[in-house]
Amino acid sequence: MIQFDTDRRLFSISTAGSSYVFGLNEKGVLQHLYWGDPVAAADCAPLLGSRLHSSFDAALDRDAEEFAYWGGLSYMEPTLKVRWHDGVRDLRMAYAGHRIERADDGKETLTVVLRDEAYPLEAHLIYGVRPGHDLIERHALIVNTGDRDVVLESAQSAAWSLPELRDYRLTHVTGKWAGEFQLRSASLTEGKKVLESRRGFTDGHANPWFAIDEGTATEESGKVWFGALGWSGNWKIVAEKTAFGRVRVTGGINDFDSEWTLGPGERFETPSFVGGYAAGGFGAMSRGLHRYQYEHVSPGRDLRKVLYNSWEATYFDVNAKDQIALAERAAMVGAELFVIDDGWFGQRSHDRAGLGDWTVNAEKFPNGLDELIGKVRDLGMAFGIWVEPEAVNPDSDLYRSHPDWVYHFPTRARTELRNQLVLDISNPGVKGYIVDFMSKLLGEHDIAFVKWDMNRTITEPGMQDHPLNRQKELWIRHVRSLYEIWAELRRRFPGVAFETCAGGGSRIDLGMLRYADQAWPSDNTDAFDRLSIQEGFSYVYAPKLMTCWVTEAVSGMNKRVTSLKYRFHSAMTGTLGIGANLNEWSEEQLREAAALVAQYKEIRPLVQGGRQYRLRALEHKSVDAVQYVGAGDMGEESVLFAFLHAQKLGDGLPRLRLQGLDPDKRYEIYGMEVDGAKDDGPEVDGVKGDGAEIDGVKGDGPEVERAKDVRSGRALMRIGVELPLRGDFDSLLYRIRELRQP
Ligand code: GLA
């Protein structure tokens, strides 16, 4: 997969669907040559060579450098910028060798070493490629081989050079609290488009991912180049287009207010920046990223549990009695995990106090936490708990005894956000405090799940007892320390699953997902709003990693009213959870919920492990549809969710063409219905399925007499299915199964 052509001085990285080629030109520049559909590396040889536009400009090949160190005639976004002990700020990096390694699992790694001509510094450019994935994992290792300090002013992970295209359309996501993961696309003109976080963690305003196409790619077709960065602090992705038409995307740790002093013999490892090329449009890009996350990023391989979370039911008003009542109801509807959210500890009866005091509140839990945990376990569920270890309320015992543990500048006021400040978790005392209280919590109680929250950006970035010339290391130290804490907790408690959350969907990236089993995409749980949030999420991250709750019929976010079925269908497209006050649900609602949970469990392997197709071919503004395809016990299986937002002017809906099926196979297709949802249940070409008969509230699943339609994969994909959706906020769920000939 990785080769070096010694005669032509070409490096090539080949995957099943892509080639990536760069070489060493006559001036010693490591010049990017090609990235796209598979080619023979030797055919790229004519592209290698320095070219000049005018005597006023740098040679054009520097615009295509694999690793753009800042020095000499270099004007683009640098990948490495340093300051030497003597004040010199210039690099001259020359190729010093390379090695290609192969691991037991088939992963190949190329390391190209560049060395400064005059100063003792090396940059190791590392490229990893795994069998079966059209992705390249890149990062850099900067090594100080001398005996003096060197200051890294910027050390980026990688620069991705794009081929010559007619247009460069950049797609990314943006958002805010309650409106995360909104897709945006625009053509790049000359200059830079910067996506970044300066808030201390990956935040909802931007996510470290980009995709570039020629302006014509769709879900199903077209060439897409993309990358996702694995860093959970301040990060930066710069898409830059030069006057010569070159486009390069550089990304890594944000150099804003950042510096790192590399001592003698020390190494600095940049985070991984995974890039890929997909010839089959945005859908193929996302499926490639999802599979990579399942196989190589997120730790938990098991199916994610159906969870119940009590936040929206009780907020801070938590006590043993109410939580036990909720747990009983949660078990009735089929939840497998009961998660108690904020409010169980210290003097935490609102968001103004208690954060940092991680002892069980004795008034709320007079018999300790184990009374609730025991009940939850008796009900057959696992138990999970909310924590926010990196932050503190000034009104807390922790802050009163350690006011210097928070980031601050002594001469400045400590700005509060959500009435809290952020702890300097790189301080060994603070880090020890967090590891200790978490170990005590997880060691003394039967806890299987941790929701780790972070509701405060970092401001006034001053670290106490830390050298003045190393204060700007804070942004990096915080993230590294966080990773170390999670790694240590995962090592000590291998059976505990973790969820990443940060005031909604703010800390979700490939760095965090190395430690987290799942992620909370948004505090907005309105089932309709969630569709666009979840769609944006799905461009980069896999459905199994996305926690979605069913909440109340009248959304607390916007008072929108939706049916139970619609809310469930929206949440069933990821990892299903319930976040409503079940104590106020009627028997009928509980029965319907139980049936829908049972349906989810039936289709869970497909949703959480299958290939996901966003069915945008319809391009009908009022309809969203998503399909999952995978192998079942009986052959190929699929499920389809479709959502109608609002029917207007008597408009009919066009047919929906499915994807990902085998054209030559025959499939049975039927609507999955439950009692109570019968009236607005789906029809497949005029054949309406019967509703479920559910005797008790708790059941193993709806016994449905299903009316089935049989069609070929070709017909389903080319002619499509009707969408018998009506009115506002209607939805359907179809199950599609390969029909094996007897
Ligand atoms: C954040 C989370 C919520 C909830 C609250 C608790 O806002 O995103 O899900 O846990 O904190 O305070």
Image (cartoon, rainbow, N blue to C red):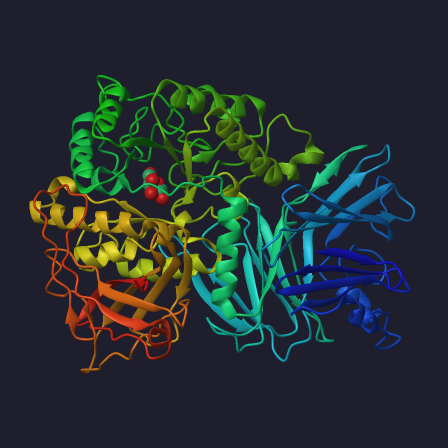
Task: Quarter of the image for the C terminus: give it.
Answer: bottom left
Q: Position of residue 449 (x, y in %)?
A: 37, 33
Task: Quarter of the image for the N terminus: give it.
Answer: bottom right
Is 100 rendered above or below residue 486? Answer: below
Is 607 rendered above or below residue 48? Answer: above
Can the viewer see residue 75 in this picture?
no
Camera-side residue of 99 and 454: 99
Camera-side residue of 12 and 738: 738
Camera-side residue of 232 and 234: 232
User: Which residue shows up at 48% across the image and 43% down it?
Assistant: 457
User: Which residue shows up at 91% across the image and 65% down it?
Assistant: 26
Q: Position of residue 334 (x, y in %)?
A: 21, 41
Q: Quadrant of residue 212?
A: bottom right
Q: Quadrant of residue 668?
A: bottom left
Where in the image, quadrant-wise, is ligand 1 located?
top left
Can the viewer see residue 77 in this picture?
yes
Is 665 rendered above or below residue 11? Answer: below
